[in-house]
Image (cartoon, grey):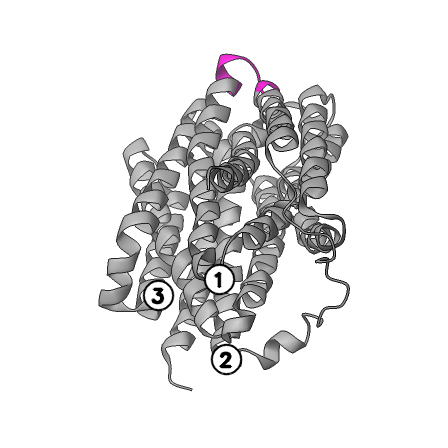
């Protein structure tokens, strides 16, 4: 029992440090890139390439872990994470930043091996509870990561958060090396598996599943557009540095922990998933639109809080709807498709934000980042319309 608890704790720490490292760079990466003369489009690529790499490499890491074991994949991913963040810290050009970000994204895709490890060591009745550890690790990583990154970026320099992320990954490497046994027993590796596409569509209520995944994709596109430009928006419009960006993003993370950790269950019982998702999409759209036109610090705080509340209502309810649409044996694979679409959206959103910001700056009209934020608000309105499709009877 003590060994099993240590295994759970180690996997929790692994996921927490992965997300912490991802969150650390958010407040400083756009400012860091701008320091090297990056254009808005290059900043969009820089932010989005991490998720694009995960979209392609997460299934590969999962397949490799089925054959070679979970521990080697976890260790290799951590070494890649160290290398990626070291390149970011040592970067002297936008190209080096791009290379470091790409390596970190490829390495960070080993989160699928961590999920597989939890599945290996958990009984069927405890598996949902075990997977809840990942949700907790993600939530805490997004709270502490931006705050730590913003503080280090202002206290030292923009490279400091990258070195911190590399150091944490190195510590985690040795922790896994010495404390985590292999969970995949010899002979258990998967050699043949039913392909995911198109078979997954035969095991879901197609209409509910497609509306859920489509809504989820739109929500993440809109939200990632905001997070990509948030540090630049605060600096150019309010002269707030990376420290303030980190604290504000941490505050949004705290709202998420409160709502998703304590309130969402009661709200779903009272209002239902579809109605709650619709409310979240409308609140988030209003927050993004408000952020686009905010001219005071107080207005910006209120609209940022609205974005956090809306996002916290949307994410778990859409995931729940997608899960409910799938047969019991296919829920994991259905949610895997949804997460892949989320990774793709985290690439599309930053790239789209960069294109729109470039277009606005070339015309020299409106407050900084008005156009991409306004468009993200419209995208959330479209997502609200998609959510309405979930509430209609087939």
Locate the C terminus and report the quarter of the image it occupies: bottom left
Residue that sits furthest to the bottom in the current view: 394
- Residue assigned mark 3: 278
Q: Which of marks 1 and 2 is in front?
A: 1
Residue that sits furthest to the top in the current view: 156
Q: State the image coordinates of residue 291 (x, y, percent, origin top left).
A: 38, 44
Which of the pair 252/227 is nearer the observer?
252
Which of the 4 quarters of the picture holds residue 41?
Answer: top right
- Residue assigned mark 2: 207
Mark 3: which secondary structure?
helix
Residue 45 in sight here: no
Residue 342 in sight here: yes
**Do the numbered discs 1 and 2 sit on residues whose CB atoms are within 8 Å?**
no
Residue plotted at (48% across, 52% down): 131
Task: Compute the Cα span from label 3 to label 2.
Answer: 17 Å
Residue that sits furthest to the left in the current view: 270
* Upstream in sequence: badge 3 or badge 2: 2
Q: Is residue 156 magenta?
A: yes
* Upstream in sequence: badge 1 or badge 2: 1
- Residue assigned mark 1: 124
The boundaries of the magenta stretch are: 153-160
Residue plotted at (51% across, 38% down): 3
Which of the 4 quarters of the picture holds residue 358?
Answer: top right
């Amino acid at each position: 029992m003590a060994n099993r608890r240590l295994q759970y704790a180690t996997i929790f720490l692994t996921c927490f440090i992965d997300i912490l490292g991802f969150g650390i760079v958010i407040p400083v990466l756009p400012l860091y890139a701008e320091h090297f003369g990056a254009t808005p489009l290059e900043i969009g690529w820089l932010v989005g390439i991490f998720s694009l790499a995960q979209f392609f490499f997460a299934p590969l890491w999962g397949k490799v872990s089925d054959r070679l074991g979970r521990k080697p994949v976890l260790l290799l991913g951590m070494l890649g994470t160290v290398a990626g963040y070291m390149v970011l810290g040592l970067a002297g050009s936008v190209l080096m930043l791009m290379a470091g970000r790409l390596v970190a994204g490829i390495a960070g895709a080993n989160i699928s091996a961590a999920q597989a490890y939890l599945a290996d060591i958990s009984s069927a009745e405890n598996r949902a509870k075990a997977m809840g550890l990942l949700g907790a690790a993600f939530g805490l990583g997004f709270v502490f990561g931006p705050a730590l990154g913003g503080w280090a970026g202002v206290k030292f320099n923009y490279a400091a958060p990258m070195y911190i992320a590399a150091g944490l990954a190195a510590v985690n490497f040795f922790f896994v090396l010495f404390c985590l046994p292999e969970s995949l027993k010899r002979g258990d590796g998967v050699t043949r598996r039913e392909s995911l596409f198109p078979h997954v569509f035969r095991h879901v209520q197609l209409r509910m599943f497609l509306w859920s995944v489509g809504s989820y994709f739109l929500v993440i596109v809109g939200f990632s557009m905001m997070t990509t430009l948030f540090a630049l928006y605060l600096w150019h419009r309010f002269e707030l540095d990376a420290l303030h960006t980190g604290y504000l993003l941490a505050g949004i993370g705290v709202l998420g922990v409160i709502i998703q950790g304590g309130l969402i269950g009661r709200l779903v019982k009272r209002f239902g998933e579809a109605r709650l998702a619709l409310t979240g999409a409308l609140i988030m759209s209003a927050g993004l639109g408000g952020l686009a036109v905010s001219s005071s610090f107080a207005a910006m705080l209120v609209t940022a809080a609205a974005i956090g509340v809306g996002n916290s209502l949307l994410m778990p309810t859409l995931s729940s709807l997608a899960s409910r649409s799938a047969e019991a044996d296919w829920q994991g694979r259905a949610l895997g498709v949804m997460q892949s679409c989320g990774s793709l959206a985290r690439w599309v959103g930053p790239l789209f934000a960069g294109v729109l910001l470039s277009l606005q700056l070339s015309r020299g009209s409106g407050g900084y980042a008005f156009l991409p934020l306004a468009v993200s608000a419209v995208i959330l309105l479209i997502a609200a319309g998609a959510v309405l499709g979930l509430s209609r009877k087939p």
